[in-house]
Amino acid sequence: ETGVTQTPRHLVMGMTNKKSLKCEQHLGHNAMYWYKQSAKKPLELMFVYNFKEQTENNSVPSRFSPECPNSSHLFLHLHTLQPEDSALYLCASSQGTGSGANVLTFGAGSRLTVL
Amino acid sequence: GQNIDQPTEMTATEGAIVQINCTYQTSGFNGLFWYQQHAGEAPTFLSYNVLDGLEEKGRFSSFLSRSKGYSYLLLKELQMKDSASYLCAVRDEDYKLSFGAGTTVTVRA
C-alpha cells in the first residue's frame, strides 16, 4: 500500500462506453498526475494538477477528460476510446511540482482494455 | 523532446551484482530518479541524484555524471525479489520529468 489508491484495477470497455478511473491519495500531497504506461514504452505524462488546478495537459486527446475536485482525489473520465488506448493508467502524487526531490508516489494502476 | 536510454532486459544470478546504465539528453538538468516496479504493482522510489557521485542505500547504489549525461543503478547481493522493472527518470530545466522505457531484471537461482 503506497498511500495512493486506484480503482478499478482492471477495466474492459467497448469503444462506445463511458467509464471513469478514480485515484485517491492519503499522503497530504498537493500535486496529482495521470500517466499512461504501454508495454516496452516510457511512461507518458498525461495531466498534472497542482492544488486542484490543471497545470499541464500533454496534448492528450479529448476522449480523456480529467477532473480534480480536491487535492486528494483525481478522476479520468473515458469516452469513445480506441483500441490503442489500452494500457496501464497510473496515478501519482507529490508534495509539489517544482524544485527539491519531489518524489512521485504511484498507485498500482488501472489496467484498461478497449475492445 | 527528451531522450533517455536504458537496456531493455538484463539477467543475473542470485547473489551477483547487476549494473543498469541510463544515458540521457535533456534540455537542462534538475535531478535523476530511479524507480522499481514489480509486475502488476506501483512503481516505487529508489534513489535521487542531483550532484555527481555515488549515493548508497543498502544493497542499492546510484551514480551520476552530469557532464556525461550518464547514471547507473547498482544492485548488489541480488535476491529473487529484485526481479522487477527499473525505471530511470530525468527532470529537465522546467522541472518536467521524463522516463526511460525501463529495464526488466530477471534474477535466476
Image (cartoon, coloured by chain):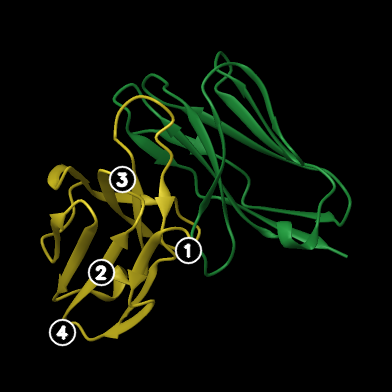
Whether pointer 4 and pointer 3 mark residues with C-beta atoms closer than 8 Å, the reply is no
Asked if badge 2 and badge 1 are on a common chain, one would say yes
Mark 4 is on which residue type?
Asn
Asked if badge 1 and badge 3 are on a common chain, one would say yes
Q: Earlier in the sequence, mark 1 or mark 4?
A: 4
Percent across and percent down for residue A22 are: 25, 69
Whether pointer 2 and pointer 4 mark residues with C-beta atoms closer than 8 Å, the reply is no
What label does residue A29 carry, if any?
A: 3
- Could you tell me how far apart the alpha carbons at marks 2 and 4 are, in whole angstroms? 16 Å
Between tags 1 and 3, which lies in front? 3
Q: Residues within 10 Å of mark 4 (few under 14, many from 20)?
A: few
Mark 3 is on which residue type?
His
- Could you tell me how far apart the alpha carbons at marks 1 and 4 are, in whole angstroms? 24 Å
Residue occupying the point 22% across, 60% down: A73
Asked if badge 3 and badge 2 are on a common chain, one would say yes
Q: Earlier in the sequence, mark 1 or mark 3?
A: 3
Look at the image and tell me in which quarter the C terminus of chain A lies. bottom left
Where A26 falls versus B31 (above or below)?
Answer: below
Where A4 falls versus A32 (above or below)?
Answer: below
Residue where numbered disc 4 is placed: A17
Image side of residue A64 versus residue A3, left or right: left
Q: Colour of chain B?
A: green
